[in-house]
Image (cartoon, rainbow, N blue to C red):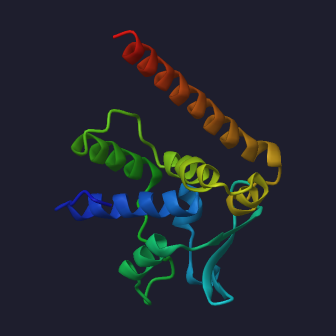
Amino acid sequence: MQAKFTVRRLELIRDLFVFSCWTGLAYIDLKNLRRQHLYTIDGQLWIRINRQKSKEMSTIRLLDIPKLLLEKYDNPTLENLFPVPSNQKTNAYLKEIADICKIHKNITFHVARHTFATTIALSHGMPVESLAKMLGHSNIKTTQIYAKITDHKLNQDMEELSHKLDNKNSS
């Protein structure tokens, strides 16, 4: 959320992407997100929404950043919590944002869901079973794919470290 955009649509898309990075919501579930999906449990704000893709319940506790974004876009006159453009436009705007930020990877909205699963949840010790419940996966094997991605990334990072150490020791 560091990048400042003077173009309102890019700011919106950045915020939607960041919200999904912190919640794991898929594009269509974010687009369908309404006040009725927000609950308070033990003083904490949660999202409970049936995923459109699987019809499985996704239960997500909101951390500080997504709560701030909900406040930013709060408009009691609208049914949906966010003004989400079409998936095609959203992904086109994400590419524009990536160019501005000099990110040389193909960024789509689904990357935010992967980011939540790997960088936010699994990398910080969240059990795969809890992540499956949050992502609305009916089969834990679907969630375990994210864990394998994390293991693969760990292996890549260790290979890179090994090469750096080998080069340093041979100097």
Q: Position of residue 30 (x, y in %)?
A: 54, 64
Q: Quadrant of residue 98?
A: top left
User: Is residue 103 shown left or right of residue 58?
Assistant: left
Q: Position of residue 2 (x, y in %)?
A: 28, 59
Give above or below for 26 relative to 159: below
Of residue 77 and residue 66, the one placed in the foreground of this image is 66
Of residue 130 and residue 91, the one placed in the foreground of this image is 130
Q: Residue at x 47, y 26 (%)?
A: 161
Tell me the quadrant of the picture where the C terminus can be found.
top left
Q: Position of residue 12 (x, y in %)?
A: 33, 64
Give above or below for 33 relative to 15: below
Q: Quadrant of residue 129?
A: bottom right
Q: Position of residue 131 (x, y in %)?
A: 71, 57
Of residue 57 and residue 89, the one placed in the foreground of this image is 57
Q: Residue at x 56, y 83 (%)?
A: 35
Q: In the orientation shown, which residue stands out farthest toward the right?
A: 139
User: Is residue 153 shown left or right of residue 92?
Assistant: right
Tell me the quadrant of the picture where the N terminus can be found.
bottom left
User: Is residue 97 shown left or right of residue 108?
Assistant: left
Give above or below for 32 relative to 128: below
Q: Residue at x 57, y 33 (%)?
A: 153
Give above or below for 64 relative to 3: below
Q: In the orientation shown, which residue stands out farthest toward the left?
A: 6
Count of numbered circles on the image? 0
Q: Residue at x 66, y 42 (%)?
A: 146
Q: Quadrant of residue 76?
A: bottom left
